[in-house]
Each structure stands twice: as structure tokens, then as C-alpha cells.
Amino acid sequence: MIGFTAREVVLGGRVVLRGIDFRADAGQLVALCGPNGAGKSTLLRGLAGLLAGSRAPDPRRVAYLPQGARCDWGMTAWEVAALGRIPHGDAAEPPVAHALELCGLGGLQGARVDRMSGGQARRAMLARVFATEPEVFLLDEPTSDLDPAAAHAVMALLRETAHAARRRVVVVVLHALDLALRYADRMVVLEGGQVVADAAPVDALARAAAAFGLPWGVDASPRLLPPSA
Amino acid sequence: MLLAPLAARAGDVVSMNLCTDDYLVLLAPERIAALSPLARDPSLSVVAAQARHLPWVRADGEAVMNLHPSLVLAAPYGAQTTVAVLEGLGVRIERIALAQDFAAIRKETRRLAALLGVPARGESLIAAMDQDLSGVRTGRKLRALALAPRGYAAGPGTLEDSVLRAAGLDDIGRGGRLGLEAILAARPQLLVVADAPGFPSLATDMLTHPILAAIPRRALPPALLACAGPWSAAAVAMLAR
Amino acid sequence: MRYRASWALAGSVSVLFVLSLLVGPAGFGVPSLPILTELRLPRALLALLVGGGLGLSGAVLQGALRNPLADPGLLGVSGCAALGAVLAFYWGLAAAFAPALPLAGLAGAGLGCLFLLAFAGRAMSGPALILAGVALSALAAALLALALTLAPNPFALAEITVWLMGGLADRSLLHVAMAAPPMLVGWVVLLRLGPRLDGLALGEEVAASLGVRVAGTLRVAALGVALAVGAGAAVAGGIGFVGLVVPHLLRPLLGERPGGLLVGALLGGAALLLGADLLARLAPLLFGLSQEPPLGVLTALLGAPFLVRIARRVAP
């Protein structure tokens, strides 16, 4: 469905990825995890065809949400989401309306994103990706700036998107390991530019914890639970 | 005609202004110590051809003093700080009066000729001028407008006005800057302009606007009117022709 | 709302255009045919073309560079165009071959755009770009003054205000015929950029992922701006602030989507310059001035406070 292979990726004189041969197939929600500077975002940009030398995929098929994407103008949520139709060269309204609904902005279509809360603005950016109706979703930290309930809602949506009809694949960079554990089908752990684990989240957790230098285990202290399905 | 002996020291008169350059070359070339730099510009000076072979000096007190002049000719404006310095150093300064009509030109020519000790040459310049002025036929008075670049119209009390009236024209200019629409509104039958300069400017470009093409025009060499003098009568003769 | 605003803009352009034909030094009224066709028509047409081009260029530059201060005047593009035109005009090139004037304006504007692109390619940040533009416009103004000082015609230096501030008085249909074709081509080039400018609203990476070729878009924008501004500045001088002000005036009416502003900015720029030129012609009648104020003075009087307002909002 989508893949990126590279012996080495050098940015600014530094090797940021090494020996990468990544593939993801339809029907999966894949989480890319690892400490800061491990190369997660670079791998995602490689998949999106944004690295020098990598071939740009069909923008109607592959949609990309960078980290910290923001809008420079006071555009409305509708206008931002409608940008997702640029690859199709149409102004079809149903996909835009549907995308805003999915991302919980159905009632805020006319609101300006520069006057929204950080979480709402982030969801407008996500709605732009959904409006493209792509097969491949490449999302860098889609839950940043979101409150816990919204983060769970977005992750559930992404999982559902990947699983529905097994036609789509979602690759997300995630710092929140608990979200990755709960929602991802597959966890790819990067450390120092290399893939050090690639397995079901439960199986990859130990390696991820080691990459962060943290212990892991099972505890029963009180905490927030995801909304019941 | 008495000429100074060849071995005599160089001339003792410095002219620091275009208008005194014209007079000095025509009245007493043998007494020239230096002219102003503009004397060589054919678009401004009526003696440009002669001046090419004559010395010139910048408006600079020290440069002028080095020539040891016994007389410096200047105008009421321009280079006034240099003139004041020279005056302070004891050099004799003579300022010409800027004439606006032919009576004043006659008077000023006589005064300068006397000052330079050549009254006979002054009279012959005046005689040539009067000959130009007397050749004018007086017929139907055309409404004429003298236009300077940028659309500045000459008006009463200017040399251009005197020239137009001497040429038997009705000068309808009232001074001030006119746009093209205002020029048309004045309904001139003749435009009097300066010869187009070698290189363009927006100021002169305006006078070539196609809407003015329908009005007859006469172009005069600009040097004839740059300074008032007996030579200005040549402009009258050209207009009256 | 958006359609109503666009129609209102188109309507005001038409009304101002007709008023332009009816106002002259003698006051209000229908003039004789030659005055109408050979003096007032070229003037009104040039105000429309130059103003439209400046407004459109401002909207495109602000969108493409994602900078609310981008403007052909502020970035020095107009100054470079005027410099090119001055070199062609005062040294007799345009007298020998009339189209040399707009072509030299185009060349100047094109070189200015190239400089900005080369600079913007390396440092896209807003302040750096504006600084490069300020440097470019100061350099263009200095070289313009030098060129006019050295020009063979004695009146040249006195005309510096026309080139720096702009003006439309006493232009002919020949000026329109020379400047209009490249300007109209520039309009078409710029108006077609809408979707690509929208794509850039979320940054260059998103634009690239949407299939928008970023470097290509900047190059096309530069070409279009050079065409729309260069030929205009060659016959009307460097009129400032129109490109800066118009998009800001229109965003509250038309929304802030960059591609949605283009037609409005074209109409708004045309209306603004027609209005300013009308005011310049009315000033002698209304206030008893002896001369028309230079057109660029009026646009600067309007634009400078705007610049301060934007700067205060942009700065933290």
C-alpha cells in the first residue's frame, strides 16, 4: 500500500535514518514511536514523498498532516477542510462536510481557525486530510493539543478508518504510548534513526520503553479510561 | 577695430554666469580670462561654438582668484556665495540686470559695452537687433502660447511675452503650469516651444502628446531665450517669418 | 455576502471609471471628444490597469509568501521597474523604439523578483523577506536618483517624484497600448494561481503534499507580478501601498482564503487607484491647490497608517 526504503537519509549533515525498509498494508493503524530525534517524522515525510530524492505519491491517494501545521490566515474551518479537495481539483461539498462532522467540527464550519482553541484548530487540520478521502493517511502527532477525551475520539476514528472495509492505512507518529497501545494494530519503534522493533503494540512495548529509558509494567493505580464503546 | 597686442597678458575679465558669457564673448572676446562651464552648451549658450576654444572656470573662489581678474561679471542669482567671497577679497564685481523686454536689453547692452570699453560694438549689436525687430509684418494677431517643458506657460512681464508681442502675436499665456486639458481650453492658434533636446524627459515628452498635434507650433532654439540679449531678437524674426 | 461584495466592487470600478472621464481641470462635465478619448480615457484606463495589477499582485504576493506585509512597492519590485524604465527613457532608447519602455520596466521588475526569490528561497521568514525588500527598494531608489542625476537631459532630476511616487497626468493612448498587453497577460497568470495559493495557506509541506509545486508557484507568481507591475511602473512610476492596502481592506468582506481574494483585489486595486486619481484631479478644484498632488502621495497618505496598523497587529 505504501512504503519507504532508504539505506541512509542525511539531513543537515546528520544521518537521521539508517537501513529503513518500511511497508504498511491496507487495514492497519500503524504507530511510529520513539524518543525525540529518533527519526519518526522523517520516516513519515519519506512516506509522503517530501524528502529530497523521494518520489511524490498521487496526492489524491496519500494525505499528510505535518506536526505543528498552522494556518497563516483567518480562514474558516470549512475553508481549511476544503483545501483537502485541491488534489481532486473540485469543490465537492459532501466530503468536506463529512470530514468536519467526523472531526467534531460540524457546528463550527464558519468559525475562523485562528480564533479557535488549539485542539479545535488541530481537528480542522485533520478534517482537511479526511476531505481528500485518501487511501493512505500520514499523520504526525494528530492528538497534540487535544484534551484526553478528544484524543481518544480521534484515535478511535483513525482505527475505524483503517479497519473499515480494509481499504485504507493510517500511519501516525505518536508520543502517547498508552494511545498507541490501546488503538494501534502495529507499533514501529525507532531509535537513533533505525527501526528497533516492529510488532503488535503489546510485544513492542518493552523495546519502546527501553528506547525511552523508562521501566514498564502493570499497575492498578487510578487513571482515566477510554470512553466505553 | 583695436585689438589687444598678441603678447599681452591673458584677458582680465571672468564671467561666472551664462548670460554674462554671451555678452562677454560678443562684446570683448580679447578680455576673456574665463567663462562659466555652461557657455559651451549649445542648448543654452548663443556663443557655444566660440566658447569651445575659450577657457572656463568653475564657480570656485580660489579658482577665480588664480586668474587675477580685474573684473568679474555675475548675475543677480547663482553662485552668490562665490561672488560674495570674491567681493570680500576686493575683486570688482559687476552684476548684470536681467532684461525682460527689448528696451531694457538695449539699455543693458549699452551699459556693458561702456563698462568693457567697447561702446561701438554695443551699438552694432543693437543695430542688428533692431533690424530683426523691424522686419515684422503686422497682420492678424494669432493667439499664441509660449510653453516651457512641464507645461509652464510664459506670461506678462517675461522675455517670452516680449518676444511674442514683438513678433505680432497675441500672447495668451498668463503664467503658471498648465496640464494638457488646460492648454486646450486656452484655445491657442500657435504653440511656441523650444527645440526638442537631444535626450528625452517627461517634461518635454508632454509637449509631444498627440492631442497637441493639431495645433500649429513653432520651435525656437532654446539658447535664444535662455538669456535676454540682442540675440533674442532672432527669435522674433523666426516667429514673424 | 462574497458575491454581493464582488458585485459592489465591480460597480464602484465602473462608477469611478465614468466619473474619471467626466472630471477635468475645468470641473465636472462632458468634455469634447478629443479630450475624452486622448486625455481622459488613457488616464482612466491606466488607473484601472495599474491599480488592478497592483492590488492583484499584492494579494498574490501576500498569499505566496504567506506574509501580510508583502507588496510590490514595499518589496522594491515597483522601484526596480521604475529604474529599468528610467534607463530606457532618458537615454533615448524608448524614443528610438517605443516598446523599449515597458520592456525595460518588465526587465527591472523581473530582476527585482529574481533577487527576492533567491533571498526568499533561503530564508522564508517574514521579517527577513521584508528586510530584503526594504534593502531592494532603497537600492532601487538610490540607483534611480543616480540615473536621473547622470541623465543627459537637464530636467531629468526634477522628475524623480514622478518615478518614485507615480503619476498618471497627460498620458496618451500610446502609453496604454504599450503597457496593457503585458499587464493583461500578468493578470491572467496571477488569477490562475488561486488554488495553488490556497494550498500554500497551511505551509509549504502541506502544499507539496497536496500536489502543489511550491518553487514553481513562487516562480510563476514572480513572473506574473513582474508582468502586471513592471509595464505599469514604466508608464506610471512606482505607485506605492495599493498592493499592501487592498487585500487587507477586502479580507473582512471576502474572507481570508488567499485564492478567494484575487478577483476582489484586482477590482479593489482598480477602484482605489481610480478614486485616488480622481481625488488628485479634484484637489485643485476643491482645495484651491495650484497643482495636482502626485498620485503616490495620496496612496501613501492612505497606506502609511495602514502599514502601522498591520505592523502593530503582526508584532507580538
Image: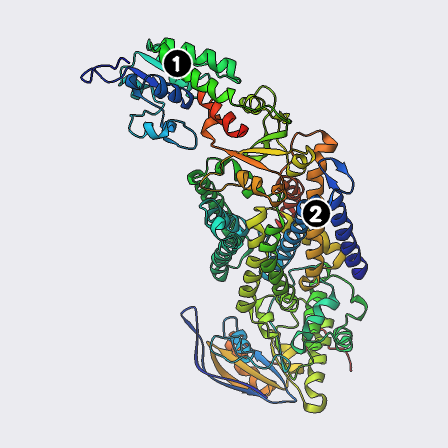
The total of numbered circles placed on residues is 2
**Residue picked out by circle 1:** B122
Residue B57 quadrant: top left
Please provide percent x and percent y for residue B92.
35, 9
Do the residues under discs 2 and 1 have CB atoms within 8 angstroms? no
* Chain to which the residue tagged by mark 1 belongs: B
Q: Residue at x 49, y 42 (%)?
A: B200
Front disc: 2 or 1:
1
**Residue picked out by circle 2:** C274
Please provide percent x and percent y for residue C252.
75, 54
Please provide percent x and percent y for residue C178.
58, 55
Q: Residue at x 52, y 59 (%)?
A: C124
Residue A135 quadrant: bottom right
- Per the image, label 2 sits on a secondary structure element best described as helix
**Amino acid on which the number 1 mark rests in the picture:** Gly
Q: Using the image, tell me which numbered label, if any, was put on residue C254.
A: none
Residue A115 quadrant: bottom right
Are the residues under marks 2 and 1 on the same chain?
Answer: no
- Per the image, label 1 sits on a secondary structure element best described as helix
Residue C74 visible in the snapshot:
no
Give C38 or B67, whichever is nearer the viewer: C38
